Image: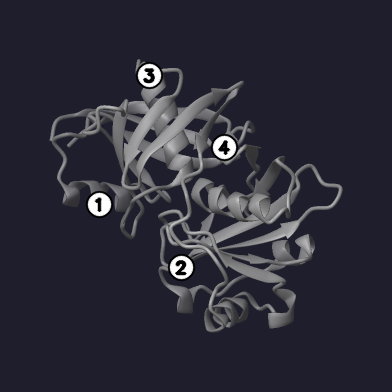
Amino acid sequence: MRAKRFTQVDVFSSEPFGGNPVAVVHDAEDMSDDAMAALARWTNLSETCFLLSPRDPQADYRVRIFSSLRELPFAGHPTLGTCHAWLAAGGSPRGREVVQECGVGLVRIRSDGDRLAFEAPPLLRSGPVEEALVARIAAACGLARAEVRDARWVDNGAGWLALMLTDRERLLALAPDLAGLHGVPFGLVAPWPGGEAAFEVRAFIGGDAVPEDPATGSFNAGLARWLVEERKAPASFVIAQGTAIGRAGRIHVDREGVQVWIGGTCVTRVEGRLHP
């Protein structure tokens, strides 16, 4: 493997080091699957991305996304971070929007003022979550079953499910025991009445390098589809995430007809060379 451009991008926050970092390796054509997986484990971030030439003629670039556990067909903050790194390296979209090729197909990304925003992909799985799984997650979080107001699958490629709570302070105080939930991606959401965001979110994947995610694009994209389609939220709103772990994630949701856009600020924090 030859030396490559390497970028680390802070996604979903305008505050320095307040968002979710993602590593981006440019020109990764000569890297094997094993090498990509090994680097993703080594970076110890929630995701590491690898920029490649597109296979689909409609795409501007292709990306492969790896967590410390597995390759993901789609993830949200890696989508925005990779697009930011690609543009900063001189990438130029063929049309008005950037078109990313990844495991779920083509994802549209647009510049939205000082933010980038991706079109939320359709849900691969939706509907109520099985009661046994809801009870299992609630127990691991130290919640009584009655504290979970609703639960839905919001899976757009990463396997997410969402549990709705009623009390934001209760949400922030939780200390989940993830030992029995290895590899189960789930998020908790509660309304924030009168707050600077409409909802507060916490998201977890047991066994991952970053078990609590600071700001999660894929989960919030699925969650947003659930909230807006069932009229639990307005057409445009903001989700806060990362508060419980000292971050300041802000995910902007905008519904336009049947399209749902998920946006946030992206800032390059590290640039350099990755050496074999």
Q: Position of residue 48 (x, y in %)?
A: 35, 44
Which numbered disc, 1 or 4, marks the residue that appears first in the sequence? 1
Residue bearing mark 1: 37
Mark 4 = which residue? 261
74 horizontally vs 185: left or right? left
The vertical placement of 203 against 99, above or below, is below
Q: CA distance from mark 3 to mark 4?
A: 18 Å
Q: Amino acid at mark 4?
A: Trp
Percent of width and height locating residue 152? 58, 66
Q: Residues within 10 Å of mark 1 (few under 14, many from 20)?
A: some
Give the amino acid at mark 2: Gly
Secondary structure under the numbered disc 3 in the rendered image? loop
Please tell me whether mark 2 sits on a helix, a strand or a loop.
loop
- Circle 1 or circle 4, nearest the eye: 4
For disc 2, the neighbor class at 10 Å (few under 14, some 14 to 19, many from 20) is some
Instruction: Evaluate whether residue 244 shows in this view.
Output: no
Mark 1 to mark 4 CA distance (whole Å)? 29 Å
Marks 2,3: beta carbons within 8 A: no
Tell me the residue that label 2 is attached to: 206
Toward which corner of the image does residue 3 lie, by quadrant?
top left
Which comes before the other along the chain, label 1 or label 2? 1
